[in-house]
Image: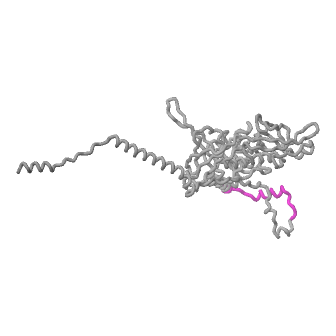
Amino acid sequence: MEEKHNQETDFMKETIKQRPLNRRKLIRRTLVTAAMAVIFGLVACLTFLILEPVISNKLYPEEEPSTVVFVEEPEENEILPEDMIVDDSQMNPEPTPPPVREDELVAQVLSEIKLGAEDYSSIYSSLSDIAKEAQKSMVTVAGVTSDVDWFNNTYENEGIVSGVIVADNGKELLILANVNTILGADSLKITFSDNMEYEAFLKKKDSNTGLAVLAVPKSDMTRNTLEEVKAITLGSSSGSNMAGTPVIALGQPMGVNSVCYGFITSSGNVINLPDSRYKRMTTDIYGSTSATGILINLKGNLIGVIDTDNGTSDTRNLIGAIGITELRSVIQRLSNDKSIPYFGIHGADVTQEVHEELEVPIGAYIMEIDMDSPAMAAGIQSGDILVQIEDKEITTYQELVNCLMEYDPEQSISIGLLRQGPEGYTEIELNAVLSMR
């Protein structure tokens, strides 16, 4: 019986063996799974790249910069239409007293004026307040260049100039500065009046003057900086007699951050550059030969950009500036990311006296042509009188300069001019293709 029981027990025993592992099949499944994961990831990335701009533009559209337009300020002595309106009291004026001699009147007024130390302190305090308000528009531009010394140590060089905020296009703050001394820098850093520093990029540059417009994205700036700084107002430098006008020099007139007070001593000097003619103002402010910055009037408006390249040797330490009126159209184009067109001429006005005495036609007199310029390629010569561009009549050289600013590089323009010959002036029509300066 016992033997039989053992046999039955042995019959009921089962041994569960593990199924043999098929390594080849396992590797194949692993590779398929990995390949599917890679394909899924690629499809997801591709879908994101395609749809992300569309979704972002719909949900969070990127703000396009607005067009910058600088409204020209009236001259200081210009009479506006509203100034010509008179009231009833002016129509029936009271009898005027007998005229007083001018020298007697001046002597009388001066005798009644007694200025003390407090009066002078008050005057300079007022000037200081104007300068402090305008300082909110001033910046320091540093061109940073990395280099390696003899011991293979990396170091940075900084070239520093002064700049001014000229516009806010909604997306960026636009800064005007002379960048000739910091060209080729690896990066541009702007320090604002609150001492905060931000990266900037070059928008456009004018090779004639060395002036450029730099941009700092507002999205990179803190709220405190945006509330602290402001764009300056462009004034006018086209007055018939700017000499004697009090001005304030801001930026780096002394070669470092500084503020100087003085007067314009002359404004009749002219800088003749290709396709441009700028008024240069001189002051009695003693400054550095490497000065940068601006001149403002007592309204706090920008009237000149400090210039050290076009002065004379005997006034090299007196601050001079290019008038803002002639620069306005250049700054506007640079601010709107437009290149400056190049024609390649130097010219002057035909005055009324020359027109009457020498019978020279009214227009823009061409004094000189740049070599290999669009003007030379078109066949324009020195001595020609340019009288028309497209359908616009040209009567002065400044009108020609302003007209050229309405066109873009690589654009073709038709030109009407008068050329002197044995039998008088002959009408000639030419075509020119502008290039970029």
Q: Quadrant of residue 107?
A: bottom right
Q: Is residue 296 above or below residue 180?
A: below
Which segment did they paint magenta? 97-120
Most extreme residue toward the right is: 423
Magenta stretch: dominant SS? helix
Asked whether 329 falls inside the magenta stretch, the response is: no
Q: Nearer the viewer, residue 214 or 17?
A: 17
Q: Is residue 66 above or below residue 378?
A: below
391 left or right, relative to 119: right
117 left or right, relative to 424: left
Q: Position of residue 32 (x, y in %)?
A: 40, 44
Asked whether 117 falls inside the magenta stretch, the response is: yes
Residue that appears at 87% across and 46% down: 362
Q: Is residue 402 above or below residue 61?
A: above
Q: Nearer the viewer, residue 295 or 69?
A: 69
Residue that appears at 78% across and 44% down: 413
